[in-house]
Amino acid sequence: MPKTLIIAAAVGTAALVNLILYGVGRAAGGTFHFTASSGPAEVDGVTVAAFSVAPLLVGLVAVALLARLGGWVIRTALVVGPLLAVATIALMTLPADLDATSTVTLALCHLVLVPVIIVAVRALGRRDGAVSRSAVAA
């Protein structure tokens, strides 16, 4: 599968699943209102999609471009990507003064990225041959 298709499938999957989660959170009573430094704010579907797509796209493009440097790129991405997805819950979601339903929903949106990252990075590694080269080197 071409790298661009792997990246597009991962980004599309993350956006779709997170928008579904957002809809479920809204239906469950989440307001997604919080206080920003500039005043009252709200997380909307566009924000959920953008915050799902942008960092994932940047990370996967970086992996696709750097994978030829060796298996270490794939191994590093398999740790750093999921770690960032989980860490941003503590850095972005928990400090916001969201209601409980909104907090849980947005935390789940971050967690959705973990399996998406793992599958996409492994696919990019296989596509580049980095996974098989790293297994031989280990």
Image (spheres, rainbow, N blue to C red):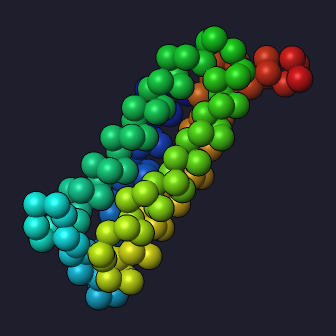
Pick the front one: 13 or 45: 45
User: Against 16, is 80 above or below?
Assistant: above
Viewed as shown, does residue 96 lie left or right of 64? left
Q: Residue furthest bottom?
A: 29
Q: Is residue 26 visible?
A: no
Q: Residue at x 79, y 17 (%)?
A: 133
Pick the front one: 79 or 29: 79
Viewed as shown, does residue 87 lie left or right of 30? right
Q: Position of residue 7 (x, y in %)?
A: 46, 34
Q: Residue furthest top?
A: 69
User: Against 64, is 90 above or below?
Assistant: below
Pick the front one: 89 or 24: 89
Q: Is residue 56 visible?
A: yes
Q: Residue furthest front?
A: 37
Q: Residue at x 57, y 52 (%)?
A: 114
**Quadrant of residue 44 within the rendered picture:** bottom left
Quadrant where the C terminus sits is top right
User: Against 69, is 113 above or below?
Assistant: below
Q: Position of residue 101 (x, y in %)?
A: 37, 83
Q: Position of residue 135 (x, y in %)?
A: 84, 25
**Quadrant of residue 128 within the rendered picture:** top right
Q: Position of residue 83 (x, y in %)?
A: 59, 48
Viewed as shown, does residue 29 lie left or right of 76? left
Quadrant where the N terminus sits is top right
Q: Residue at x 42, y 69 (%)?
A: 94
